[in-house]
Image (cartoon, rainbow, N blue to C red):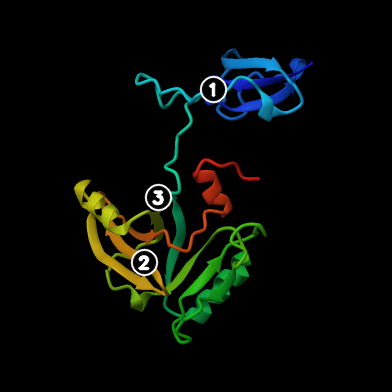
Amino acid sequence: MKKVYTCYICGFPFVRDEEKCPERCPACNAPKSQFLSEPFNGSIDNRRIHVDFPKPDPNWDPMDISYHHPKNFKPRSRHGRIRRFVLGYDDPDVTRRFYEEVFDWDIINTEHANPELPLMYCATGPGNPNWEPKFPSFGYGFLKPKVTEDTGSDPRFMVEVDNIEEALKKTVEYGGKVLKERYEVEGQSYAVVEDSEGNALYYWETPDTVTWDEPESQYLSGRPIK
């Protein structure tokens, strides 16, 4: 007999034959004892039981992974995500040849790149055709001329933030340093900081052109990816 199971811990609903009910929640790994169940009436959307997310237990051990409360991401925000890597080069032809031949990466000059010392997209592949299809692969970064790095800190990672000014304020508040205030490259806003341990990072502000229809945006705003 098919039943609709709803997890007490994370609210995840799923349908299974009663004899095939999993021992743990597919979403949060909570044990079977935490499931509500009811007869399946033809559609998971017609279930009678709807569970509100519980408030996290203040005494819950975050290192206990036997089950966990779901993290509620801020709606319409991609704040805090590592988005890209940045690697410096001296000779663009030598660098391009290295990554193309060693890793089979795709190297593409940015739209307004200086032909002598281009800023280059570095697409790592293999890719997913439904993800950022403008580029040939899933994960990508930039290859940047070393002579254009004016902070002297050689930052290697780019973190996406909702608002650069607010992120810079928190950076200083929690022991970091601002190495370069907001600036723009090809219409995108960036900043450069050091964390509390002296590691340099780029900040990239989520652009206004985001439609929130991108797969990652749907996930982070609480909507399932279809």
Q: In the rendered structure, which amino acid carries the disc numbered 2?
A: Ser
- The residue singled out by tag 2 in the image is 189
Res 125 → quadrant: bottom right
Residue 220 lies, in percent from the top left, at 50, 45
Q: Is residue 24 visible?
A: no
Residue at point 43%, 62% (across, down): 208
User: Which image quarter: residue 6?
Assistant: top right
Label 1 Cα neighbours within 10 Å, binned few <14 / some 14-19 / many ≥20: some
Residue at numbered disc 3 = 79
Q: As drawn, is 5 to the left or to the right of 111?
A: right
Q: Residue at x 55, y 28 (%)?
A: 28
Query: Is label 1 in a helix, a strand or a loop?
Result: loop
Front-most of 97 and 166?
166
**Residue 17 in picture, x, y percent from top left:** 77, 20
Residue 147 to residue 8: above or below = below
Q: Which of marks 3 and 1 is nearer the N terminus?
A: 1
- Looking at marks 2 and 3 on the same chain, the residue that comes earlier in the sequence is marked by 3
Mark 1, residue position: 51
Q: How far apart are marks 1 and 2 (CA)?
A: 41 Å
Question: What is the x, y in percent for residue 226?
Answer: 66, 45
Asked whether, in this view, residue 185 is left or right of residue 31, the answer is: left
Vertical order, 26 against 77 (above or below): above
Please tell me which of labels 1 and 2 falls first in the chain: 1
User: Amino acid type of disc 1?
Assistant: Val
Give yes or no for contact between labels 1 and 2 (Cβ–Cβ under 8 Å): no
Which part of the image, by quadrant, shows the N terminus?
top right
Asked whether 144 or 100 is in front, the reply is 144
The secondary element bearing badge 2 is classed as: strand
Q: Is mark 3 on a helix, strand or loop?
A: loop
Q: Nearer the viewer, mark 3 or mark 1?
A: 1
Q: Nearest the camera: 163 or 203?
A: 163
Q: Which kind of residue does numbered mark 3 sit on?
A: His
